[in-house]
Image: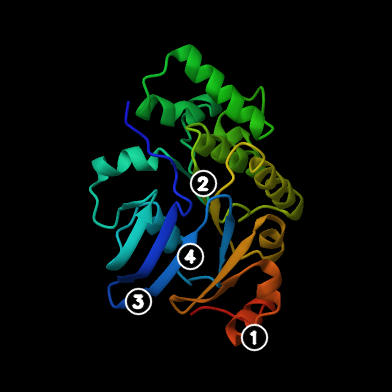
Amino acid sequence: MDPVTPAPEIPVELREVRKSFGDKPVLQGVSLALRKGTTLAVMGGSGAGKTVLLRITDGLIRPDAGQVTLFGTHIERMREEAMLPLRKRAGFVFQGAALFDSLSVFENVAFPLREHTSMSLGEITDRVHRSLSVVGLPGVDDLLPAELSGGMRKRVGIARALVLEPEVIFFDEPTAGLDPTNARLVAELMASLREGVCDTAIVVTHDIEFANMIADQMAILHQGRIADIGTPAEMRASSNPDVRRFLAGELREE
Protein backbone atom coordinates (compact mmCIF):
# COMPACT_ATOMS: atom_id res chain seq x y z
CA MET A 1 0.00 0.00 0.00
CA ASP A 2 1.32 3.44 -0.89
CA PRO A 3 2.36 5.53 2.13
CA VAL A 4 0.10 8.54 2.51
CA THR A 5 1.29 11.71 4.16
CA PRO A 6 -1.31 13.81 5.97
CA ALA A 7 -2.99 16.45 3.84
CA PRO A 8 -1.26 19.80 4.35
CA GLU A 9 -3.22 22.86 5.41
CA ILE A 10 -2.96 24.02 1.78
CA PRO A 11 -3.47 20.82 -0.27
CA VAL A 12 -3.58 22.70 -3.61
CA GLU A 13 -1.44 25.64 -4.70
CA LEU A 14 -0.71 27.22 -8.09
CA ARG A 15 2.01 29.78 -8.69
CA GLU A 16 2.25 31.81 -11.89
CA VAL A 17 0.72 29.02 -13.99
CA ARG A 18 0.68 29.63 -17.74
CA LYS A 19 -0.85 27.60 -20.53
CA SER A 20 -1.34 28.23 -24.25
CA PHE A 21 -2.77 26.10 -27.04
CA GLY A 22 -0.97 26.98 -30.25
CA ASP A 23 -0.80 30.76 -30.41
CA LYS A 24 -3.82 31.21 -28.09
CA PRO A 25 -2.86 32.03 -24.48
CA VAL A 26 -5.39 30.60 -22.02
CA LEU A 27 -3.77 31.05 -18.59
CA GLN A 28 -1.35 33.94 -18.21
CA GLY A 29 0.05 33.73 -14.71
CA VAL A 30 -2.58 32.22 -12.37
CA SER A 31 -1.77 31.92 -8.67
CA LEU A 32 -4.12 30.61 -5.98
CA ALA A 33 -4.09 28.48 -2.86
CA LEU A 34 -6.84 26.16 -1.60
CA ARG A 35 -6.90 25.85 2.17
CA LYS A 36 -8.10 22.60 3.75
CA GLY A 37 -11.79 22.76 4.65
CA THR A 38 -12.55 25.32 1.93
CA THR A 39 -14.76 25.16 -1.15
CA LEU A 40 -13.41 27.50 -3.82
CA ALA A 41 -15.60 28.42 -6.79
CA VAL A 42 -13.57 29.37 -9.87
CA MET A 43 -15.79 31.50 -12.06
CA GLY A 44 -15.56 33.33 -15.35
CA GLY A 45 -17.10 33.58 -18.78
CA SER A 46 -17.10 30.85 -21.42
CA GLY A 47 -13.56 30.36 -22.71
CA ALA A 48 -11.93 31.94 -19.66
CA GLY A 49 -9.81 28.82 -19.03
CA LYS A 50 -11.65 27.46 -16.00
CA THR A 51 -11.62 23.82 -17.07
CA VAL A 52 -8.00 24.05 -18.23
CA LEU A 53 -7.10 25.39 -14.79
CA LEU A 54 -8.93 22.53 -13.06
CA ARG A 55 -7.25 19.87 -15.20
CA ILE A 56 -3.83 21.37 -14.58
CA THR A 57 -4.55 21.31 -10.85
CA ASP A 58 -5.27 17.57 -10.99
CA GLY A 59 -2.29 16.83 -13.23
CA LEU A 60 -4.42 15.91 -16.25
CA ILE A 61 -2.78 18.69 -18.30
CA ARG A 62 0.75 20.03 -17.90
CA PRO A 63 1.25 23.79 -17.66
CA ASP A 64 3.72 25.53 -19.94
CA ALA A 65 5.23 27.35 -16.96
CA GLY A 66 4.67 27.84 -13.25
CA GLN A 67 4.34 25.53 -10.25
CA VAL A 68 1.46 23.22 -9.30
CA THR A 69 1.50 21.67 -5.83
CA LEU A 70 -0.87 18.86 -4.84
CA PHE A 71 -0.68 17.58 -1.26
CA GLY A 72 2.71 19.22 -0.86
CA THR A 73 4.22 17.65 -4.01
CA HIS A 74 5.17 19.52 -7.17
CA ILE A 75 3.32 17.78 -10.00
CA GLU A 76 3.86 20.07 -13.00
CA ARG A 77 6.51 17.77 -14.52
CA MET A 78 5.56 14.51 -12.82
CA ARG A 79 5.07 11.39 -14.96
CA GLU A 80 1.63 9.80 -15.08
CA GLU A 81 2.58 6.67 -13.14
CA ALA A 82 4.09 8.77 -10.36
CA MET A 83 0.89 10.83 -10.21
CA LEU A 84 -1.38 7.89 -9.41
CA PRO A 85 -0.93 7.83 -5.60
CA LEU A 86 -1.69 11.55 -5.47
CA ARG A 87 -4.61 11.37 -7.89
CA LYS A 88 -6.26 8.69 -5.74
CA ARG A 89 -6.47 11.33 -3.03
CA ALA A 90 -8.29 13.80 -5.31
CA GLY A 91 -11.67 13.03 -6.89
CA PHE A 92 -12.64 14.59 -10.24
CA VAL A 93 -16.23 15.12 -11.40
CA PHE A 94 -16.27 15.76 -15.14
CA GLN A 95 -18.70 18.20 -16.73
CA GLY A 96 -20.73 15.57 -18.55
CA ALA A 97 -20.30 12.98 -15.75
CA ALA A 98 -18.16 10.96 -18.24
CA LEU A 99 -19.82 7.66 -17.36
CA PHE A 100 -19.09 4.52 -19.36
CA ASP A 101 -22.22 3.98 -21.45
CA SER A 102 -21.87 0.19 -21.58
CA LEU A 103 -21.36 -0.25 -17.83
CA SER A 104 -24.05 -0.32 -15.16
CA VAL A 105 -24.19 2.31 -12.44
CA PHE A 106 -22.57 -0.16 -10.04
CA GLU A 107 -19.67 -0.89 -12.41
CA ASN A 108 -19.18 2.81 -13.20
CA VAL A 109 -18.80 3.64 -9.52
CA ALA A 110 -16.73 0.53 -8.82
CA PHE A 111 -14.30 1.26 -11.68
CA PRO A 112 -11.77 3.35 -9.65
CA LEU A 113 -11.71 0.68 -6.92
CA ARG A 114 -11.01 -2.10 -9.41
CA GLU A 115 -8.30 0.02 -11.10
CA HIS A 116 -6.52 1.37 -8.02
CA THR A 117 -7.14 -1.01 -5.11
CA SER A 118 -6.97 -4.71 -4.29
CA MET A 119 -10.32 -4.73 -2.49
CA SER A 120 -12.41 -7.88 -2.44
CA LEU A 121 -15.78 -7.96 -4.21
CA GLY A 122 -17.53 -7.63 -0.87
CA GLU A 123 -15.48 -4.58 0.09
CA ILE A 124 -16.08 -3.01 -3.33
CA THR A 125 -19.82 -3.67 -3.05
CA ASP A 126 -20.00 -2.07 0.39
CA ARG A 127 -18.02 0.99 -0.72
CA VAL A 128 -20.07 1.47 -3.92
CA HIS A 129 -23.36 1.20 -2.05
CA ARG A 130 -22.12 3.66 0.56
CA SER A 131 -21.17 6.18 -2.12
CA LEU A 132 -24.47 5.79 -3.96
CA SER A 133 -26.33 6.23 -0.68
CA VAL A 134 -24.43 9.46 0.03
CA VAL A 135 -25.65 10.93 -3.28
CA GLY A 136 -29.21 9.72 -2.72
CA LEU A 137 -29.25 6.89 -5.27
CA PRO A 138 -29.68 3.56 -3.49
CA GLY A 139 -31.03 0.68 -5.54
CA VAL A 140 -29.87 1.81 -8.99
CA ASP A 141 -26.99 -0.67 -9.37
CA ASP A 142 -28.19 -2.33 -12.58
CA LEU A 143 -29.31 0.75 -14.51
CA LEU A 144 -27.30 1.97 -17.49
CA PRO A 145 -26.40 5.67 -17.91
CA ALA A 146 -28.94 5.98 -20.76
CA GLU A 147 -31.69 5.05 -18.30
CA LEU A 148 -30.82 7.91 -15.94
CA SER A 149 -31.94 11.52 -15.93
CA GLY A 150 -29.32 14.25 -16.30
CA GLY A 151 -29.42 14.97 -12.59
CA MET A 152 -29.00 11.29 -11.73
CA ARG A 153 -26.00 10.98 -14.06
CA LYS A 154 -24.38 13.94 -12.30
CA ARG A 155 -24.92 12.27 -8.95
CA VAL A 156 -23.47 8.96 -10.18
CA GLY A 157 -20.42 10.92 -11.36
CA ILE A 158 -20.10 12.42 -7.88
CA ALA A 159 -20.47 8.96 -6.30
CA ARG A 160 -17.64 7.67 -8.49
CA ALA A 161 -15.44 10.59 -7.40
CA LEU A 162 -16.24 9.84 -3.75
CA VAL A 163 -15.65 6.10 -3.86
CA LEU A 164 -11.89 6.35 -3.19
CA GLU A 165 -12.66 8.61 -0.20
CA PRO A 166 -10.65 11.57 -1.54
CA GLU A 167 -9.33 14.45 0.52
CA VAL A 168 -10.11 16.99 -2.22
CA ILE A 169 -12.70 16.93 -5.02
CA PHE A 170 -12.53 18.89 -8.27
CA PHE A 171 -15.91 19.65 -9.90
CA ASP A 172 -16.10 20.82 -13.52
CA GLU A 173 -19.40 22.68 -14.14
CA PRO A 174 -21.48 20.30 -11.97
CA THR A 175 -24.77 22.02 -12.83
CA ALA A 176 -24.18 22.44 -16.58
CA GLY A 177 -27.20 21.26 -18.60
CA LEU A 178 -29.44 20.83 -15.55
CA ASP A 179 -32.78 22.50 -14.98
CA PRO A 180 -33.03 24.78 -11.91
CA THR A 181 -34.58 22.08 -9.72
CA ASN A 182 -31.84 19.53 -10.42
CA ALA A 183 -29.16 22.23 -10.14
CA ARG A 184 -30.42 23.07 -6.67
CA LEU A 185 -30.44 19.38 -5.69
CA VAL A 186 -26.81 19.05 -6.81
CA ALA A 187 -25.91 22.20 -4.85
CA GLU A 188 -27.58 20.83 -1.73
CA LEU A 189 -25.77 17.51 -2.19
CA MET A 190 -22.39 19.23 -2.56
CA ALA A 191 -23.03 21.31 0.55
CA SER A 192 -23.91 18.15 2.50
CA LEU A 193 -20.67 16.41 1.45
CA ARG A 194 -18.76 18.79 3.69
CA GLU A 195 -20.31 17.17 6.75
CA GLY A 196 -17.83 14.34 7.20
CA VAL A 197 -17.44 13.19 3.56
CA CYS A 198 -15.08 15.63 1.84
CA ASP A 199 -14.72 19.18 3.11
CA THR A 200 -12.30 20.57 0.50
CA ALA A 201 -13.13 21.29 -3.13
CA ILE A 202 -12.52 23.42 -6.20
CA VAL A 203 -15.66 23.98 -8.24
CA VAL A 204 -15.55 25.43 -11.75
CA THR A 205 -18.83 27.14 -12.59
CA HIS A 206 -20.36 30.07 -14.43
CA ASP A 207 -23.50 29.92 -12.23
CA ILE A 208 -23.35 32.75 -9.69
CA GLU A 209 -26.39 31.60 -7.70
CA PHE A 210 -24.96 28.09 -7.42
CA ALA A 211 -21.56 29.43 -6.33
CA ASN A 212 -23.21 31.51 -3.61
CA MET A 213 -24.83 28.34 -2.26
CA ILE A 214 -21.71 26.20 -2.00
CA ALA A 215 -18.56 28.36 -1.89
CA ASP A 216 -16.53 29.85 0.97
CA GLN A 217 -14.24 31.55 -1.53
CA MET A 218 -14.68 32.77 -5.11
CA ALA A 219 -12.04 33.45 -7.74
CA ILE A 220 -13.00 35.33 -10.90
CA LEU A 221 -10.92 34.32 -13.91
CA HIS A 222 -10.69 36.89 -16.71
CA GLN A 223 -8.31 37.09 -19.68
CA GLY A 224 -6.12 34.32 -18.29
CA ARG A 225 -5.63 35.82 -14.83
CA ILE A 226 -7.40 35.91 -11.47
CA ALA A 227 -9.19 39.26 -11.45
CA ASP A 228 -10.03 38.94 -7.74
CA ILE A 229 -10.46 36.32 -5.03
CA GLY A 230 -12.28 36.37 -1.71
CA THR A 231 -15.46 35.40 0.09
CA PRO A 232 -18.78 35.76 -1.74
CA ALA A 233 -19.48 38.91 0.30
CA GLU A 234 -16.08 40.35 -0.63
CA MET A 235 -16.71 39.62 -4.30
CA ARG A 236 -20.08 41.38 -4.16
CA ALA A 237 -18.33 44.40 -2.63
CA SER A 238 -15.34 44.26 -5.01
CA SER A 239 -14.29 47.49 -6.70
CA ASN A 240 -12.64 45.53 -9.54
CA PRO A 241 -14.56 46.48 -12.71
CA ASP A 242 -14.16 43.02 -14.28
CA VAL A 243 -15.59 41.36 -11.16
CA ARG A 244 -18.50 43.80 -11.07
CA ARG A 245 -19.21 43.22 -14.76
CA PHE A 246 -19.10 39.43 -14.35
CA LEU A 247 -21.46 39.46 -11.37
CA ALA A 248 -23.80 41.74 -13.32
CA GLY A 249 -23.83 39.25 -16.18
CA GLU A 250 -22.08 41.63 -18.56
CA LEU A 251 -18.68 39.95 -18.89
CA ARG A 252 -18.17 37.61 -21.83
CA GLU A 253 -14.93 35.98 -22.96
CA GLU A 254 -13.95 35.93 -26.61
Give the Cα separation between the discs numbered 3 and 1.
26 Å
Q: Percent x, y for residue 146?
A: 57, 36
Identity, as a three-letter code, of the amino acid under mark 4: Lys
Which callout, 3 or 1, points at the residue further toward the start of the chain? 3
Camera-near label (4 vs 1) is 1
Residue 239's disc number: 1
Q: Percent x, y for residue 189?
A: 68, 43
Which callout, 4 or 2, points at the residue further toward the start of the chain? 4
Q: Name the residue under label 4.
A: 50
Which callout, 4 or 1, points at the residue further toward the start of the chain? 4
Give the Cα separation between the discs numbered 4 and 1.
22 Å
Q: Percent x, y for residue 93?
A: 51, 46
The image shows residue 213, relative to residue 148, as above or below, that is below
Give the Cα separation between the discs numbered 3 and 2.
27 Å
Q: Name the residue under label 2.
A: 169
Identity, as a three-letter code, of the amino acid under mark 2: Ile
Quarter holding the N terminus is top left
Q: In this view, does 150 lie to the left or right of 204?
A: right
Residue 25's disc number: 3
